[in-house]
Amino acid sequence: MAARGGGEVILEVRNIHLRFGGVKALSDVTFDVREHEIRAIIGPNGAGKSSMLNCINGVYQPQQGSIQLRGRTFTHMNPRRVAEMGVARTFQNLALFKGMSVLDNIMTGRNLKMRTNILQQAIRFGAAGREETAHRKVVEGIIDFLEIQAYRRTPVGKLPYGLQKRVDLGRALAMEPQMLLLDEPMAGMNVEEKQDMSRFILDVNDEFGTTIVLIEHDMGVVMDLSDRIVVLDYGRKIGDGSPAEVRDNPDVISAYLGAVH
Amino acid sequence: MGPFLETLLGGLMVGMLYSLIALGFVLIYKASGVFNFAQGAMVLFAALAMARFAEWIPRLTGLNNKLADNAIAFCGAALVMLVLAWLIQKLVLGRLVNQDGITLLMATLGITYFLEGSGQALFGNDIYKIDIGMPKDPIFILEQTFQGGILVNKEDLYAAVIAAVLVALLALFFQKTATGRALRAVADDHQAAQSIGIPLDRIWVIVWAVAGVVALVAGVIWGSKLGVQFSLSLVALKALPVVILGGLTSIPGAIIGGLVIGVGEKLSEIYLGPMLGGGIEIWFAYVLALAFLLVRPQGLFGEKIIDRV
């Protein structure tokens, strides 16, 4: 674990304030993510975990504070620009292209890597054809990795939930991201599916060296997977550190179990 | 049997043209959730551009080759539609992202009036003709099988073939190219499409441009048949029952819906017409659409909308 967590800081989140009208979703949240680590964000319902992830992903623009990715500051970010900077994400409530096949869904993840223009594609000879084949190879690799070979041609909407979650991960992986944001990758899964997903997350981190930021409710999973954990409660950071440190933090315990008055 | 087949064939050919116009609606609705009321005005605008370019080009260049003139005029009109698509996205829809469906609908209603007005201001408001050398003479087929054979209007036949080829090309484009895949992705889920770096506004420009070119082809075909005039923008009203029948979100639905309406219209005119005093071709499609709304509001192939409460 130590070998994995020791990289340099690639994402710095500083003093983030995010408000929706009068509701404070995040107040003064600061943390960093080091290269090649698995960083978890946990907290009770409504703690602001998804809001935090959406700030990093460029969906929300915090009113105050700064986010730096590899020294580049995020200003006026949108999800597309964040994607161009090498950040991919998965969604809490699956946001797959339901009518499209597994293969096509994952192929869309290659969109940013496509270099041919619409006219070349329309003719589909030469460059566009070669490009399609090259990307297809990468995608087949991902399909093998996620063990969904049998469902290549199946429309995603017809797959069971656990497999849809894998396709969601596959589409993000197809972007060959430097950083992967996972929003509750195991929500609604049974034990077996959770084990599979945990294995995939660890393998992605190991084999591709991808930095991972994840939100998860299952404490067992979080403690096993992550190198460091940020704990949020009511939009504030109440804990930050290794799983052991977080587990023993009295603020964290009271946030989860209720304060002793 | 002879007259029945003749009517059926005629219906299929007209139906193919309805499909083409309906396709314009479906493309835009799928990708951006906008019900594009301006589709008919786009047909008129494109046809006007085409008709006038074909008239101006020989005068300006002295080029008197009909094929070349028409080809250049077509490309010119296509270019106009591309620019129009870009302008609509930049000036109107790009500023209305995340607004209600009804707001977007009203915006397209505004675009309708703008296109109808500016089209006639730019290109004139007479009746113009588009002469792309469509054969006007009918042919007879299967003369051995039936007495007198089956009369086929050659112009309709050509038009149907052109429409069918265009529809097939579009289907291939959507299914087989990376841009087509991105278009389908946007149609399925905007948020997810953005997260993997698909640029929404560029996709919308592409969709409007494709719908513009579809409108151009429809305009050229109808225009060469009926002449280019204001009433061309009403042709799109025929596509409304088609999209209701086929479902607003389904490309196969638009095609089959168009064929069903085309055939239904012609057959009902022949077989039900005499009982009802004739002239039912004009309203048959709407009654069919109304019946469909009562029984299957999502259309033949549309997505059933189930809201979680």
Image (cartoon, coloured by chain):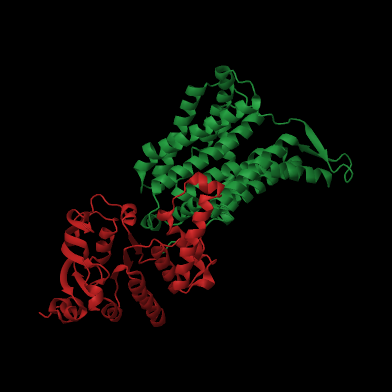
Q: Relative to A169, is B96 above or below? A: above
Which residue in the rendered view is the most extreme toward the left?
A261
**Based on the displayed image, in which of its 4 quarters is residue B66 positioned?**
top right
Q: Relative to B216, is A226 above or below? A: below
Location of the C terminus of chain B (image quadrant): bottom left
State the residue in front, A191 or B109.
A191
Which chain is red in the rendering?
A
| Left or right: where A124 falls relative to A50 | right
State the residue in front, A74 or A49.
A74
Q: Name the spot of residue B122 as percent of width and height, x first.
A: 48, 23
Q: Name the spot of residue B171 as percent of width and height, x first.
A: 58, 50
The mark total stands at 0
Q: Colour of chain B?
A: green
| Left or right: where B24 falls relative to A165 | right
Q: Relative to B292, is B53 above or below? A: above
| Left or right: where A154 falls relative to B10 | left
Q: Name the spot of residue B208 as percent of width and height, x first.
A: 47, 41
Q: Is residue B35 visible?
A: no
Q: Name the spot of residue B304 as percent of width and height, x first.
A: 51, 59
Tell me what residue is drawn at x 30 percent, y 52 percent: A78
State the residue in front, B61 or A170.
B61
Q: Relative to B68, is B199 above or below? A: below
